[in-house]
Image: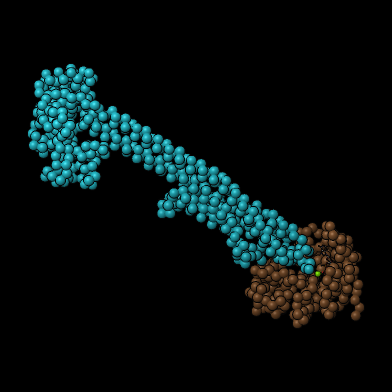
Chain colours: A cyan, B brown
């Protein structure tokens, strides 16, 4: 016969007491392993969230970059060249020029060796209807940047095109659309649409600007000329980044007029700078948001850590005391048994071992229960869902081992004094009877 | 006949702190040889339990010598004394002290906890003992399902498992009715007849014995009938 039979049967006999002991260890180990898991889960989640934020920011920046180019193309010009007869009032009222220039003008300018001109962009822009969609739009046709002959260093060898144009032509068979249009019809890049009976692929959807640009359709100049029935015509030549200041507008007007007699040159305030600043502000804002997120998550992490460093010792101490009193009560309850075992000749050390073993069994089983509950609760609390594949990775054997050791230490410490007391009980006092 | 128990001028005084001391045993001498069946009578509080516990090596007297099988048991280390007790002495108490979560067979086998023994042999002996006491049909019952008389018989079987030389019984019939008392006493007498030494402490003056003593205020005197 082995003491183990006594330990096993007694546990079964006094289930409630043992159950309370188990709960007690489970709570202690649960809060221990749970706290550690919450912290781990929190850190993993933080990394994920930050990675996502950074990705979003990068995408947002790319979008802004594109917008910037768009703005440059439409508005980022220092001057625009219109027909001499163009009424400024009509320009404002209609939203685009209603007088036209021969397309050939832009080439004449390009070959004209006007030192102050850098980038030329001819445009045919007109309000119209998209018949298939019954939608008012602004159609914007452009062949892309037209070479300026004196800028040979930027041009291809034959001088016919830019090697790296700042504004590229829209590819054949494609169009770009503003945000409002895309929204209205649920269009996305790569979709094919029919415009005036012709199929086009959507090359790009431009980000919301909150302006007319949102209802623009960009296409190649010849396409626009065909649609608008303006063969060989344009209505604006944008001259980008002209080497002139506003005071010197008279000089550039004269130079241009020498080549093109029936045009007028207008300077328009640049919204580009404002947009550029907005873009920078957006970027700063995004960076600040990420920094705030990092700080916020770090703060939560610190709070969790502080909480854990208070919680764990308190719970360990409380459950240690609880186990101590449980085992003590168990010794009192079993004094008849202690007396007879001593009378039979069982050694004191065996008596102590019987009670200590019970505490250790309580520790082992309670630790496993506490570990399972603690880790699960910790992972859930830390933002890792039950069906998340990483959920199970938090059940790591090292933490289980540590949990077992902590529980065994706890129960050994708490059970030590009661077990010693049991061994030291004077059997005569118990057996003398009344 | 050799003396199994030799009690030489034993004195024991309890000195509870802050209260008056009690002379439980005063110069008590007594011997129990092989095959003897002796009874110590006395009122409650006369020192009977103190006498038996001292004889069993569970309570060291203040003066005198206790020899069991010729060994001065209080000169043994506590460990050796425990082992000696396991091999040589069996106890029966008024409160049977059965272990509630072990069945009858297991209860009877508990003395094997103290000694290294062959399990099969122990179980065999336990079964025989239980049968001898007429409890064979109760082997796997817990003590709570037994009558009071049956419980005392289980306690007796447990006391005899290791085939002790000396059996000490403190009020073995104290909780039993007449019929059950007779059964227990008959078995104790049987044990003595087969060469065991039995010493009973009781307040029941009706128990017949080879030799009877009266314990009064710690002093022992023979009773002549
Ligand atoms: N631990 C103790 N402290 C003080 N007095 C005790 C103690 N144990 C027993 N006594 C006293 O010693 C006397 C003998 O007790 P005991 O041996 O139990 O007698 P009995 O078994 O005959 O009833 C009693 O008066 C009892 O009150
Ligand atoms: Mg007594």
Question: The C terminus of chain B lies in which quarter of the figure?
Answer: bottom right
- Residue B148 figure quarter: bottom right
Residue drawn 62% across and 67% down?
A13
| Residue at 41%, 43% in the rendered image | A48
- The quadrant where ligand 1 appears is bottom right
Residue placed most toward the observer, A362 or B34: A362
Quadrant holding the N terminus of chain B? bottom right
What residue appears at the point 16 percent right and 33 percent down from the top-left corner?
A: A93
Q: Is residue A17 above or below residue B184?
A: above
Q: Position of residue A394 (x, y in %)?
A: 47, 50
Write down the quadrant of residue A233 in the picture.
top left
Horizontal arrangement in the rendering, residue B216 relative to residue A146 (left or right): right
Expressed as whole percent of the image width and height from the top left, the position of residue A53 reads: 38, 40
Q: Can residue A349 be seen?
A: no
Q: Is residue B13 above or below residue A264?
A: below
Q: Residue furthest bottom?
A: B179
Instruction: Relative to A287, say whether B111 is above or below.
Output: below
Q: Is residue B208 visible?
A: yes
């Amino acid at each position: 016969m082995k003491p183990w039979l006594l330990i096993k049967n007694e546990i079964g006999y006094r289930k409630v007491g043992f159950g309370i002991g188990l709960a007690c260890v489970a709570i202690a180990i649960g809060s221990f392993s749970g706290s550690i898991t919450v912290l781990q889960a929190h850190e993993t989640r933080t990394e994920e969230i930050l990675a996502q934020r950074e990705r979003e920011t990068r995408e947002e920046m790319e979008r802004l970059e594109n917008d910037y180019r768009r703005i440059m193309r439409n508005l980022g010009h220092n001057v625009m060249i219109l027909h001499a007869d163009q009424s400024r009032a009509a320009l404002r009222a209609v939203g685009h020029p209603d007088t036209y220039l021969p397309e050939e003008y832009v080439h004449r300018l390009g070959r004209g060796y006007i030192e102050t001109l850098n980038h030329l962009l001819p445009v045919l822009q007109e309000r119209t209807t998209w018949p298939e969609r019954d939608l008012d739009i602004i159609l914007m046709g452009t062949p892309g940047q037209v070479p300026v002959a004196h800028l040979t260093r930027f041009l291809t060898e034959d001088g016919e095109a830019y090697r790296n144009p700042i504004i590229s032509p829209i590819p054949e068979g494609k169009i770009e659309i503003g945000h409002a249009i895309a929204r209205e019809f649920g269009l996305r890049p790569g979709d094919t649409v029919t415009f005036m009976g012709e199929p086009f692929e959507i090359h790009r959807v431009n980000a919301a600007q909150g302006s007319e640009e949102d209802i623009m359709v960009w296409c190649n100049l010849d396409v626009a000329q065909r649609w608008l029935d303006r063969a060989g015509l344009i209505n604006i030549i944008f001259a980008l980044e002209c080497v002139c200041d506003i005071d010197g507008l008279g000089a550039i007007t004269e130079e241009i007029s020498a080549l093109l007699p029936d045009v007028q040159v207008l300077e328009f305030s640049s919204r580009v700078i404002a947009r550029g600043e907005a873009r920078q502000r957006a970027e700063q804002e995004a960076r600040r948001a990420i920094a705030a997120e990092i700080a916020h998550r770090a703060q939560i992490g610190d709070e969790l850590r502080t909480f854990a460093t208070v919680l764990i010792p308190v719970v360990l101490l409380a459950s240690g005391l609880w186990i101590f009193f449980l085992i003590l009560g168990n010794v009192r309850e079993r004094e008849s048994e202690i007396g007879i075992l001593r009378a039979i000749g069982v050694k004191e050390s065996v008596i102590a071992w019987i009670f200590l073993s019970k505490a250790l069994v309580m520790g082992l089983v309670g630790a496993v229960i506490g570990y399972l509950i603690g880790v699960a609760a910790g992972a859930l609390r830390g933002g890792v869902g039950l069906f998340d594949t990483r959920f199970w990775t938090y059940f790591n054997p090292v933490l289980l081992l540590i949990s077992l050791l902590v529980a065994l230490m706890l129960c050994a410490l708490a059970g030590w004094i009661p077990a010693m007391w049991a061994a030291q009980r004077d059997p005569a006092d118990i057996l003398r009877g009344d | 006949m050799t003396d199994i128990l030799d009690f030489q001028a034993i004195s024991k005084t309890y000195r509870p702190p802050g209260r008056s001391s009690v002379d439980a045993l005063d110069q008590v001498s007594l011997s129990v040889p092989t095959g003897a069946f002796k009874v110590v009578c006395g009122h409650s509080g006369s020192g009977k339990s103190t006498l038996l516990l001292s004889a069993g090596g569970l309570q060291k007297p203040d003066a005198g010598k206790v020899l069991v099988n010729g060994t001065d048991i209080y000169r043994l280390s506590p460990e050796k004394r425990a082992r000696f007790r396991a091999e040589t002495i069996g106890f029966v108490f008024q409160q049977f002290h059965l272990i509630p979560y072990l069945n009858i067979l297991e209860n009877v086998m508990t003395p094997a906890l103290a000694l290294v023994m062959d399990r099969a042999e122990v179980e065999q002996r336990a079964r025989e003992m239980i049968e001898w006491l007429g409890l064979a049909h109760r082997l796997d019952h817990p003590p709570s399902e037994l009558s009071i008389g049956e419980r005392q018989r289980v306690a007796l079987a447990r006391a005899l498992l290791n085939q002790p030389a000396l059996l000490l019984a403190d009020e073995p019939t104290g909780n039993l009715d007449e019929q059950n008392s007779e059964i227990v006493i008959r078995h104790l007498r049987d044990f003595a007849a087969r060469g065991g030494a039995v010493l009973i402490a009781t307040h029941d003056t009706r128990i017949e014995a080879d030799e009877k003593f009266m314990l009064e205020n710690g002093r022992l005197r023979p009773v002549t009938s």
